[in-house]
Image (tube, rainbow, N blue to C red):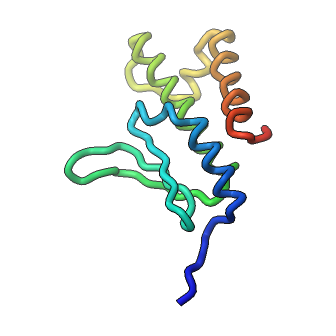
Amino acid sequence: MEKKSYITLEEQKKCRKVADAFAELEDVDIVVVDAGRYGFVKLQYYTPPTGFENDSTFTDSREMFEDLWEEWLHTQIIVLAREMGAGDIDYDNFFKRLPEEKQNELMGRKQIFAETAGIEI
């Protein structure tokens, strides 16, 4: 039986760069692992003894970049909301309530991540 590959070697290299660019997400229970010929898998919300509650598989570096970017941005918004004593938050509304300087700072990080990952935005 022939082993089928679900990701090209080129995309695998690109995805590795994206995963490395967002390595800091491991601090918030998100880890991206190389699943070889199957692509890359994002694992979230680890709880013993059951393991990770969510998983997503990627074979496209652009899709993986956008997904990890959203995770990073939402994580930052949650941290800011906690620091400001906000209760339940709506990401979009909370973001719009931030000072323009902070919004620009957060959005500027997307370009930094993209450069690190070798992705054009």
Looking at the picture, does residue 42 appear above or below residue 115?
Answer: below
Q: Is residue 70 left or right of residue 115?
A: left
In-front residue for pair 8/97: 8
- Residue 19, percent from left and from top: 57, 43
The quadrant of the image that shows the C terminus is top right
Q: Which residue is drawn at 67% across and 9% down?
A: 101
In-front residue for pair 118/87: 118
The residue most toward the bottom is 1
Rendering quarter of residue 40: bottom right
In-front residue for pair 13/29: 13
Q: Residue at x 64, y 65 (%)?
A: 7
Rendering quarter of residue 22: top right
Looking at the picture, does residue 79 appear above or below residue 21?
Answer: above
Rendering quarter of residue 97: top right
Q: In this view, does 88 lie to the left or right of 23?
A: left
Q: Which residue is drawn at 64% across and 57% down?
A: 12
Q: Which residue is drawn at 66% across and 53% down?
A: 13
Looking at the picture, does residue 44 appear above or below residue 100?
Answer: below
Q: In this view, does 10 lie to the left or right of 88?
A: right
